[in-house]
Amino acid sequence: MRSVTFVQWIACCLLILTALPAAATVRTWPGSTPCNSTLQACIAGSTNGDTVEIASNDPVDEDINLFERSLTLRAATGFHPQLTAGRWLSVSTSSLLGNQTVNVSGIRLLNGYVSVHYNGTGTGTYDLRDLDANRITLEAASGTVNAMIYNNRIVGTSGGINGGLLQINSRGAELNVDAWFNQVRTITPGLAEGAGIFVDETIASSGAVRLNGNTVRGAFGRSAIYVSEGLFSSTPSSFDARVYNNVTVCGGTADFNGGKGIGFVVSDGSINVQAVNNTVSNCYYGIGASQWSGGGSGAHIDGLVWNNLIVANYGLQLNVPLASGVTNDYNLINAPHNTVGGFALGANTLLTPAKLVSSGIPRLTATSPAIGAADLATLGFGLLFNGLPVLDADGLRRLKGPGSHAPDIGAYEYGDLGFMHTASATSSSYITSIVNPVTDGNNALDIFATPNFNAGGAGPNVIYNQPFGSWYSAGHWTLFGENTAANVPANTHFNVFVPALGDGRLRHVATAANSSGWTTTLDDSSLNDKPDRIVLVNQNYTAGPKYNPHPIGVLYFAFGGPGTWSIINLDQLSSGGDMPVGAGFSVYSQAPSPNAFRATQSSSSSGLKLDHPLLNNTPCAQIAVTRLFGAQPAAGNFDVYYFGSSWYIWSYGGQISAGDQFNVVINPAQVELCSDVIFANGFE
């Protein structure tokens, strides 16, 4: 009875916390006054600090202006608002305004742009994320500007020779901007003017620009990523540029029209550069440092260019004496011309074929010399001191491999694998054996399986509403029903995710000391006091040979002390629902990213739609999913299925209540290799 009270008390606490009133008003458009007419009227009638949620999928035929407003404007849960073609969204100030704080997320602009311009006397704070647009610009004209530009999809034209699809400018301000995990692509055929991401700081600007995990595709005359000081200005600026884990795929290596990868350029001031673990592929020029024409003799670029993978005609262009303060090492250069500028390559440079999937899909194959060849200290300390996530360009774990295994050169970390397993057509047992070279002969693996009802629409459609686990036997991993009386139906499909060794992959065994009632508590540095972690769990009979015939999920609890994650039997009110001592589990955890996230149900239903650019219109995608403990027990299990153009989670244990959540992990390498969907068209 004590454990029943404990779990019910947790549920009560969760409900109470959910019901706490917000400090500011959350308004829904369309809704009551002032949100009963246009969206712009709703914004105008809101108070600074309010949140306006767009709860409509109908096209919004308005230009949206947030002049001197401090608001959050976002899509309501379960909705996907869009502005009609050519409409724009503008955030701006006068020179008299003090502080401004604006957050915008989840809006699609059809052939429209997003513009942010701060000209005030205080601090502008901006968060732009999950937007689809043909251009995003941020300009800091005065004061201090702090910005996060995260997980946006920008497809269009650069807007000129000194423009970018993602344009970040400072004109005398202190600019601190993080641009992470944005997908940028030009639609210009041949060589495009300008850059994919163009950063320029002039007129005594300062601060730091952190470009991390972005992917830029197309041939650009300036560079796919171009970081500039002093364009059209002789007044020196000085700032830090941190360029980590980015991918640039240009238009070809044969001539100049193939474009450039990553460029740094100064006029009269300086840039402190850290270009670390980027992948530059199919470019005429790889990574370069140069000076604007007419720049002063005191201009300089210093810093480091390490751990980069470069496939180009010209590898590194670090002109001396301008860039004499730049060190380079641990790069892999796959180029006919390794260097330009009269400098020496670092002793650990690799001059060898990169062995990629292709120049357009610059992922490492299993035999690539880039695997495990990067400098761990440079990457590790760089991520730590610059406040960057320990993730690669896919948004998955950056550090993988046994022990202190060195990271891979380039933006992608090799090692996470996956496939679909289908139970034999002659299956007549509660066990289905996995015969696959990814898993055969390796009992140290941890596998995470998710039932897939219809194999992405290919069928056959098979219901498997049973708790299950994994077990290694006779050289093969198997999946088995925890209820041994229930056979695995023939042709049952499972998505199988096999993460590499490394931080965040572990095994857990329930003991009397770490278990109570229906839960067993995890204790690991990758999880403790980290409520935002995306956690997957799978029962593992090899780790702990004990049956646990219950659907499982995870729970984070921190009431009155350090926070911990637990594995919980979700049907805890059933007879015999306690967590058995000796039960084993595989556990995977990582920091959240665009491809490792928490999906939340908006209104009660048996299905939860997963709206994600790598999943939409992608029936071959393989998703790994774990349920979180909610306010109500889950009497049954779940699977995923593909219908129409979308993936869904389906619950067999009654409806998924509003507010219920699932942890979801997508492996972009698997999606890209099965479909090439990442840039199949403008927005899907």
Image (cartoon, grey):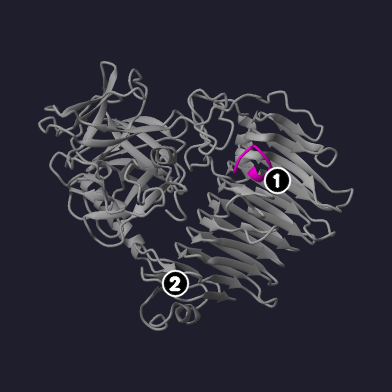
Residue 148 shows in this picture:
yes
Which quarter of the figure has residue 288? top right
61 to 591, vertically: above or below: below
Q: Position of residue 351 (x, y in %)?
A: 66, 24
Front tag of 1 and 2: 1
What's the magenta region? 250-259
Residue 107: horizontal and vertical position, in percent?
A: 45, 64
Q: Is residue 336 above or below residue 58?
A: above
336 is higher (above) or lower (below) than 566: above
Horizontal arrangement in the rendering, residue 459 relative to residue 191 (left or right): left
Which dot marks residue 52? Answer: 2
Tell me the tag on residue 263: 1
Residue 481 position in % (x across, y down) = 18, 32
The amino acid on which the numbered mark 2 sits, given as a three-letter code, is Val
In front: 32, or 634? Answer: 32
Instruction: Determine contact: label 1, label 2, CB under 8 Å.
Output: no
